[in-house]
Image (cartoon, rainbow, N blue to C red):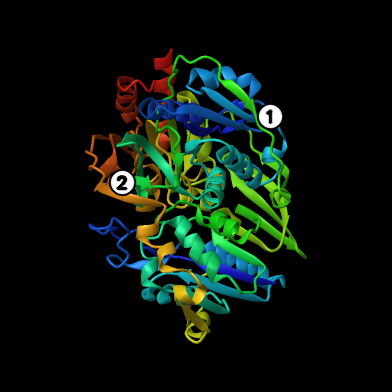
């Protein structure tokens, strides 16, 4: 079985994030960029399937600017086998469905049985991409997996929701997205970091994967941000210090009562 | 006349609160566009709820009365909506911005040539165009988003973004829908459900959420959180540190890699308020931390805060609430 793990380059959550003042797209050059934290769980899922003898090859796929190569190498350092990077100026400003279209086209002609996504990126957090890619590829999508089991071409997933999870069953080829509860991601080893530098990396443009520039990008995005403003700063309210006896609870209860929460 | 579709999110044969909130939002929009508000109920159970849907603004109710709607993953819901859209005149689709429904929106967006906006906290009509307010970067920025001309707007509404209001409407016109599913739609079957029944409200819908973090020190601490929550009719959430430690289930995690909540009141106990946590709760109307570290960043966004040992403060607080409730 062959697995493809699509990853995303995102601004570091701890850094200051900005929108480009002109086109209101994420200003990805202004802050330190990292591998989307949720992708650590999808990479770990793929590695565990490989270690269990269920998969023999894991390829990472990344749509992003040239600088996303650092993200691709980071992903490879966990022990993945090769990478495809789609880089093209025309992709900039695409919405989630636009990116899904690029990912789907990039997989045209790629031999795979399973696509494993992190369930969301920590910047846009739409969760839309895995299902949209599945739609483009006419594949089943077993998303929000907190558990996965593969037996031959049968795939069983525990699909997390607000009240627990659904047990769902489908067959390969399929798209899966995973949530944090699924595993405990490892750290890249020194050996992995060194090896990542020489792993095969194929870079392609939109033309190479058969996407016209007027199908994607900001000007062709189906959904876009037209105006953005910072959240007004919250004013700090009253802070009381407890003397160790818990007596500050009285002041808190007063406040709760005044604001009609009791 | 065009129809504004509202996909009803329901559980245990009742509409979830967010569904009535969406109908209220749709009624406001339709008042400006002249659209008809049409609820869509997929699966059994609509008949007993048509009155409450009508009372909140549904003028029409599409009902596909089949276990298949949620017997398979995502695609039956997509095909039902796509059929309604193809056969009718639909101006926009509203859905509850929960994970499973986002999958429906994503596929429908691709299939129906739509644009999808998730997690909208407000809607308005300007020059006949539907604009959605959406918070990004964990609530640091507030944006106005729109769907391109010629694309069907498919917009996810956050729970608690609107207050549900009765519109004074009567029962809706019920239209039975029959969907012949494609082979693809029955490929992923739901074979079981693991449901942890709780008397507490879901954290996304709850007006008050009590959340516990690393400062609880142990799993037992969540019993205290639950006791406080139950006094306030609140839901219980957890920081990532607490869910990673296995003290509380992952689906209650509030924050960047968990869920985003906007309750009227958030009480955080033993939570320092790292940026990853704030990304999931800073849009709460009132924020009340209880934490022994006066330097914890969460105090910067507190409406009222207590610096102190939560194991001293919370039990006293529970007693205070009990006695004030009388």
What x and y, as percent, mark residue B157? 44, 38
The disc at residue A104 is: none
Asked whether, in this view, residue A232 is left or right of residue A26, the answer is left
User: Crowding at label 1, few (<14), some or many (≥20) Cα neighbours within 10 Å?
Assistant: some
Residue B265 visible, this orientation = yes
* Quarter-of-image position of residue A139: bottom right
Q: Is residue B167 above or below residue A26?
A: above
Can you name the residue that lies furthest to the top here?
A: B326
Q: Residue A106's spot in the image, x, y percent?
A: 53, 71
* Residue B315 in view here: no
- Front residue of B198/B226: it is B198
Tag 1 residue: B44
SS of the residue under disc 2: strand
Sequence-earlier tag: 1 or 2: 1
The span from disc 1 to disc 2 (Cα, nearest Å) is: 37 Å
Q: Mark 2 — residue?
A: B143
Q: Is residue A52 left or right of residue B3?
A: right
Q: Chain of mark 2?
A: B
- In the image shown, does A217 or A214 lie closer to the viewer? A214
* Label 1 close to label 2 by CB (< 8 Å): no
Query: Helix, strand, or loop for circle 1?
Result: loop
Badge 1 and badge 2 in a common chain:
yes
Q: Quadrant of residue B300?
A: top left
Q: Is residue B176 above or below residue A100?
A: above
- Measuring 59% from the left and 58% from the top, which residue is drawn there? A134
């Amino acid at each position: 079985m062959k697995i493809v793990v699509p990853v995303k380059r995102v601004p570091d959550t701890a850094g200051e994030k900005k929108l480009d003042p002109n086109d209101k797209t994420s200003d990805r050059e202004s802050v330190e960029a990292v591998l989307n934290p949720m992708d650590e769980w999808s990479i770990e899922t793929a590695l565990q399937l490989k270690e269990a003898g269920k998969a023999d090859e894991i390829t990472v796929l990344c749509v992003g600017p040239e600088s996303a190569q650092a993200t691709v190498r980071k992903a490879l350092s966990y022990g993945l086998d090769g990478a495809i990077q789609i880089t093209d100026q025309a992709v900039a400003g695409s919405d989630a469905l636009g990116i899904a279209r690029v990912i789907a086209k990039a997989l045209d002609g790629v031999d795979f049985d399973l696509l494993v996504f992190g369930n969301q990126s920590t910047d846009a957090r739409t969760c839309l991409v895995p299902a949209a890619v599945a739609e483009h590829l006419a594949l089943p999508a077993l998303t929000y997996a907190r558990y996965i089991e593969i037996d031959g071409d049968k795939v069983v997933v525990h699909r997390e929701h607000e009240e627990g999870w659904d047990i769902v069953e489908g067959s390969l080829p399929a798209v899966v997205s995973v949530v944090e509860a699924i595993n405990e991601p490892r750290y890249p080893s020194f050996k992995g970091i060194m090896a990542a530098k020489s792993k095969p990396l194929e870079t392609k443009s939109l033309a190479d994967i058969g996407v016209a520039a007027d199908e994607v990008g900001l000007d062709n995005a189906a959904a876009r941000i037209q105006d953005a403003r910072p959240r007004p700063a919250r004013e700090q309210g009253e802070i009381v210090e407890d003397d160790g006896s818990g007596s500050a609870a009285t002041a808190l209860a007063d406040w709760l009562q005044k604001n009609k929460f009791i | 006349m065009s129809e504004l579709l509202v996909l009803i999110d329901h559980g245990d044969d009742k509409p979830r609160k967010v569904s009535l909130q969406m109908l209220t939002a749709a009624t406001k929009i339709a008042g400006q566009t002249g659209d008809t508000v049409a609820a869509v109920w997929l699966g059994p159970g609509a008949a007993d709820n048509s009155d409450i849907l009508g009372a909140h603004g549904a003028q029409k109710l599409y009902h596909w009365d089949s276990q298949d709607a949620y017997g398979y993953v995502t695609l039956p819901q997509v095909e039902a909506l796509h059929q309604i859209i193809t056969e009718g005149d639909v101006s926009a689709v509203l859905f509850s911005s929960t994970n499973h429904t986002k999958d429906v929106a994503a596929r429908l967006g691709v299939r129906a040539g739509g644009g999808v906006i998730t997690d909208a906290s407000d809607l308005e009509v300007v020059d006949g165009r539907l604009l959605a307010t959406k918070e990004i970067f964990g609530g640091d920025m507030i944006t106005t988003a729109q769907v391109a001309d010629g694309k069907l707007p498919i917009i996810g509404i956050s729970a608690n973004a609107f207050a549900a209001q009765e519109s004074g409407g009567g029962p809706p016109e019920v239209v039975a829908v029959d969907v012949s599913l494609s082979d693809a739609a029955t490929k992923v079957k739901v074979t079981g459900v693991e449901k942890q029944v709780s008397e507490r409200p879901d954290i996304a819908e709850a007006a008050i959420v009590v959340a516990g973090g690393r400062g609880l020190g142990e799993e037992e601490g969540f019993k205290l959180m639950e006791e406080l929550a139950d006094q306030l009719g609140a839901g219980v959430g957890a920081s990532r540190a607490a869910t990673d430690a296995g003290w509380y289930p992952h689906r209650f995690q509030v924050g960047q890699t968990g869920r985003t909540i906007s309750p009227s009141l958030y009480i955080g106990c033993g939570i320092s308020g790292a940026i990853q946590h704030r990304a999931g709760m800073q849009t709460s109307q009132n924020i009340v931390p209880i934490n022994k570290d006066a330097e914890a960043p969460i105090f910067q966004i507190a409406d009222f805060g207590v610096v102190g040992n939560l194991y001293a403060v919370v039990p006293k607080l529970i007693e205070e609430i009990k006695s004030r409730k009388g």
